[in-house]
Image (cartoon, helix red, strand yellow):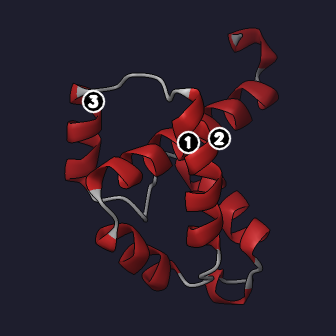
Amino acid sequence: MNMFSMNREESIKRLVELGKAGFYPLFDDSWFFELAKNNTPLNAKQQEKAKSLIKRLGQHRSLERQKTVLFSMPEEDRNIIMKTFLKLVEGSILDEAPQLH
């Protein structure tokens, strides 16, 4: 099954699996450097916003369309998505390796 025929949830799950392998196809490498400069946890308002941003991203099944949406977002929204996505990847890794908790 390829990225183009997946539903929204499968698409996000596949991106998490790729993230666990260290591959983040949606994000530009330079964004990680910017995120590292100001890596504060998301506050409650940002966590709420993350849900709608991820939903908006998930409305597009193809990787290219998702990238287009991300590149058109304001930096703050992109950072919220990146932090949320990295938390999903971290959570998935910890679920598989509880000894890392």
Counting residues from the start of the chain, the first of labels 3 and 2 encountered is 3
Label 2 – label 1 distance at C-alpha: 6 Å
Residue 88: image tag: 2
Q: Which residue is identified by label 3?
A: 36
Label 3 – label 2 distance at C-alpha: 17 Å
Q: Give me the residue at 59% from left, 38% from top.
A: 47
Residue neighbourhood size for the residue with mark 2, other residues' Cα within 10 Å, grouped as few (<14), some (14–19), many (≥20): some
Numbered disc 2: secondary structure? helix
Indicate the quadrant containing the N terminus: top left, top right, bottom left or bottom right: bottom right
Residue 3: image tag: none
Between 35 and 19, the residue placed more toward the observer is 35
Q: Give, as a three-letter code, the residue at label 3.
A: Ala
Where's residue 101, x and y in %? 71, 10
- 94 in relation to 49, above or below: above
Residue 8 falls in image quadrant: bottom right
CB-based contact (under 8 Å), mark 2 and mark 1 = yes
